[in-house]
Image (tube, rainbow, N blue to C red):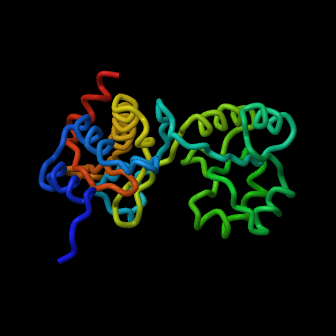
Amino acid sequence: MAKLTKHQKKVQERVDIEKIYPLGEAIEIARELRRPNFDETVELHMRLNVDPRHADQQVRGTVSLPHGTGRTTRVVVFAEGESEKLAREAGADEVGGDELAAKIKGGWTEFDAVVATQPMMRVVGRLGPVLGPRGLMPSPKAGTVVSPQDVGEVVAQLKAGRIEFRVDKTSNIHVPVGKASFDVAQLTVNTATVIDAVVRARPPAVKGQYVMSTVLATSMGPGLKIDLASALAEEATE
C-alpha cells in the first residue's frame, strides 16, 4: 500500500466526505488545504435536477462576482464606429471586424471572452466552428451580443469579474468563484452570489428538488459538500 504524503494525511484529518459543511467552514478548510506555492482557483460545482436535453430545462445566465475572479479576463470585441471607441475605453484587449475574424479563424485564441455588437454578428457568425466548441460564441442569452451603446458597460463587467454559468450535458454547473489567496469573506460573498444566481435561474418546468448537491473545491483540493441553506443565508445578509 502506497504511503500517504504529509498533505494527504492532512486532508484525511480535516475532511469528512460524508459531512455537509456550512459555507464559511467549507471555505476555511479549502483555504487551509491549499498548496503553498500555487494560487489555486476555488471552484463551485452544482448538480441540478434538470434534463439539459429539453429546451425548457436549460439553466444559463451571467453573474458578476463582487470580488472578481482573481485573474485577468482577456476580452475581444467585434464593433465598429463609436462602439469600437467605447469598447477600447472600457479596456477591451482587441477590437475589430473582418480583420479580427480572420485573425481568429487563422488560429489565434488568446482570449477568454468575446463580445459583439448586434450589427457585427454578420461577421462573427462565420466563426461558429472556432468559437462554438470553446463556449465563446457571443449570444444574447450570455449577454455577449449587445447594442452598440451598451458595449462599453459589458466589457467593463467582464473585465471586473462577470462570469457565465451554464448547465452541461450531465446536469452539472462548474464555475470559478475566486482564488485560494482571497480571504474567507471575499470567497463567501462570491460563492453565495453565484449560488443565489443559479437558484434564481430555476426553469419553471423543473418539479421537485432543484439543487441536488453543491460542492466547493480548489483546483487541486478535495471536494467539500456545502449546505445550500447556509449559502443562501449568506447572500440574504448582503
Quarter of the image with the N terminus is bottom left
Count of number-bearing discs: 0
Q: Position of residue 148 (x, y in %)?
A: 75, 37
The vertical placement of 135 against 182, above or below, is below
**Which residue corresponds to the image point at 65% horizontal and 33% vertical from the top-left?**
156
Q: Is residue 237 above or below residue 75?
A: above
Q: x%, y% of residue 27?
A: 29, 40
| Image quadrant assignment for residue 154 | top right
Position of 199 relative to 123 (above/below): above
Tell me where residue 3 sits by quadrant.
Answer: bottom left
Q: Quadrant of the C terminus?
A: top left
Q: Nearer the viewer, residue 3 or 218?
A: 3
Front position in the image: 118 or 81: 81
Q: Name the residue: 63% across, 50% down.
A: 113
Query: Which of the 4 quarters of the picture holds residue 193?
Result: top left
Where's residue 87, x and y in %?
Answer: 76, 37
| Residue at (52% x, 40% y) in the render | 70
Q: Is residue 74 visible?
A: yes
Could you say where residue 59 lies in the image, as x and y percent from the top left?
A: 40, 52
Classify residue 31 as left or right of residue 75: left
- Residue at the limit of the structure toward the bottom, as seen here: 1
- Between residues 4 and 219, which one lies in front from this camera angle? 4
